[in-house]
Every structure is written in C-alpha cells, then in structure tokens.
Image: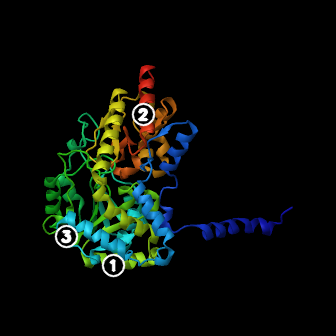
Amino acid sequence: MPCAKSLARAPLARAASNALHAPNARLASLPRSNVFAACTKMAGDHGAVNLGQGFPSWPVPQFVLDAAAASIRDSEAGFNQYSRPGGHPLLLDAIARFTASRFRRPISEENVTVAAGAQGAISNVFATFCAEGDEVVFIEPAFEMYSRMAAMHGCHVRGVPLGNVTGASVASTSEQLTLDIPALEAAITPRTRLLILNTPHNPTGKVFSRAEYEAVASVVRRHPRLLVLSDDVYEFMVLEASLEHVHFALLPGMWERTISTFSAGKTFSCTGWRVGYCIGPPELIAPLTSTQSIVSFCAAAPLEVAIARSIDAAEALGYFDSLAASLRHKRDELVAALGAAGLKPIVPGGGYFVLCDTSGLKAAGGPSPPSALADDNAFAQRRDYLACAALTKSVGVLGLPIGGFYSPANRHLSDSLLRFAFCKADGELHEAAERLREAKARGAL
C-alpha cells in the first residue's frame, strides 16, 4: 500500500512531468485539433471522394520527373549535397530570367531567395520581419496558416472579410466578391507590420483586379512601416481570358516594400518537393536568406536543380497555357455538378478551389453556437463541419469546412461554406459528379 509521503509526492511529480513536456506558450495557444486530418479520416472511413485537400492527384509532368531523375543521378555534379541557403545557382539564374520576362524589369540573383516550399518562405517572412506584438492584416477567408504563423511569432491578426461571400447577396462568381477598402484602412494601425495579399485567392478563386490592387496600394502608401507579402502561388492558374494576374510589387512605389512568394510545387504539380521562393528588393531578400540558413539551411538541392531545368523547358512546351486550360475544364465540370445538386458554387476565376454555399443543406442544421465559433478546437460543433459530414456520409463527396480560414470575430461567415478542390484526376471528378447526381435523384440533397 502506498505510504502517505508517496501519495503526497504524486501531484508534484505529475506537475513536473507536465512542465517538462509542455510546449512554449505560443505553440500551446494554437488549435490542438486539425480539420484537415479529421476530414481526411472521415473521407477514408466512408469511402468518399476527397475534394477537401488542395494537392493535385494527376501525375507530375514527365519533363519535370525527367529533370529530377537526371539531377539525382548526376553524382559528379554534386547536386545531392547542400546547395546555398538562398538557392542553388542554377535555380536562382532560372528564376531571375523567368521573373524578369514576366515583371518586365531587371531581376538578378540578389532579388531571389529559395525556401522549403512557399509555406516555408512565408514562415521565413514572419520570422525575419515580425516581432512580438506586431499586427498582421489579411483578407478573409484566408489560408489558415497565415493566422497560425502569426500566433507562433506572437503577432495579432486582423481579418478584413470579402463581401458577398455568404448571405442573401451571395456571389455567383468570384469576381462579384467585394473588397471593402475603408475596412482595410481601418484594420491597419501603427502596430501593423505585415499586409498579406493573395491572388488568385485561396479559397474563393477571386482574381483581384488592377483597380482593386491600386486602391490597396493607395492605403499602403499611407503607412510607412507596412510591408506587403504578396502570395502569388496560383499565378499560372488564372482561368478566364478576361482576367489578369496583377503583381502587386509592380504597382508604383510598391516594389521596395513587397515580398512576392511563389510555389514551384503548385506550378509543376509536385507539392511534396517543397520548393518555393521569394522575389523582392535586395534589402528584403538578404535577411530572408539569413533566416533560411538558420532554419533548414537549404531546400532539397537536386529538386532545386530539377525545378531550374523545368522552368527552362516549360515555356517551350506551352506548359503554363495547358495547365490553365486543364484546370478550366475541371472547374467547369465540378461547378456544374455542384449546381445541379442544388448547392450554390461561387465560380472561381483562378486557383483550383471552388467555394460553395450549402445553406440549402438541411441536414447540416442551424447556425453554429457562439462558443464553437470562438473556440478553434470546437470545429466539429460548427455548421460548416456538420455540412461536410452530411455530404460525406450521405453523398460520398467531401468538401473542406473553412471556419479556420476566418478569424474568430468573422467566423460566423463560414457557417454555410465548403471548399472543393478540382485539382484532381478526371476520374475522381467524374465519380464525384456522378455521386452528386445520384444523391440529388434520390432526395438526399
């Protein structure tokens, strides 16, 4: 039988053990649950077509695979050893030439730094330029890692929601979504260090117009401490000839204060390779390279070389036009299937996601309770998650709940919204469309 002293020591031992294994306060403040993991498990449990996660399920282009195989096999060139922290010279040169042709301005290796994926590049921006107590502003809904990275670095987030995403005036196309410039101006304070822009926009597919970005630039000019992170990872996925990808950095006065981020993984459908890069003035790029040298030193060297060679080959092969054309076809099929099923898709102008209003889906129940909207770990109690579960179980198609794409103050706007990815093999999209048609016919929707 335990003695009194051992019983008395037990709570102290447990407390010491808890303290030993406790993460730092910033990490502990982040959600313990992961909606991506929960949805992936749900899709597997019910044999659903998983259109929740945004990774391509078609093969990597053969010319990209060939470039990777060649760089790995070329042992004499040393491509399998460390590259430089800012990127392998072959990749820096390829990116500089490629970017100069699109930006129509001189770009040298001093304007480029490579990281372990675009997410790694964005994380480097936070680590390099944001301090505890700084504020970060972005347009909502937004890629949820923006807010998590802000929390990891002790920053506060301010979300500016797009208009017409939901409600009685819900948009039918992403171009009908509106950006409230006075609200953006009001969100920026003397403590704001970073404004994050994203076009084509995840998850809405909105391609911001030149006029919209010029209005944003007019706000930025009034805040001398404000840096802009332009997340351009979907640059080559503009799906309408009437739309253009506008580089925010090229607007008057914006080059000196803008870091533009790109993803080779998304561009070449090899997201697991984790090769991303930033473009900007040397004064912003050099500190990012210093951060990269501390975090992981370099990205995967042979894959950097493969991306360099793929960039050089892609234009000659007409790859970028064929990518957009393929995605346009896939978008049209999924949008038609969702609409025929009685849901309300917002037709995206770019990217590879379609946002869908599920307010007519009665199985999802009523509005989310306020407690669930405020608690990042309570996503399973929110209406968007219940809509996801209803579609997964009764139809066999999974779309992603986007509550995590809004800050708590604006999270109620996500109640009826699911994000569907159409960056999938044709067979998967055909199957999803057939399941939606069948469910509609038997009254399951």
- Marks 1/3 in contact by CB < 8 Å: the verdict is no
Q: Quadrant of residue 416?
A: top left
Give the label, 1 or 2, closer to the camera: 2
Kind of residue at disc 1: Pro
Horizontal and vertical percent position of residue 202: 33, 51
Kind of residue at disc 3: Trp
Residue that badge 1 annotates = 287
Residue that badge 3 annotates = 255
Residue that badge 2 annotates = 430
Q: Quadrant of residue 369?
A: top left
Residue at point 80% right, 66% down? Answer: 4
Horizontal and vertical percent position of residue 267: 35, 56
N-term-proximal mark, 1 vs 2: 1
Q: Can residue 153 be seen by looking at this rendering? A: no
Give the camera-side residue of 270 and 204.
270
Residue at point 36% right, 67% down? Answer: 308
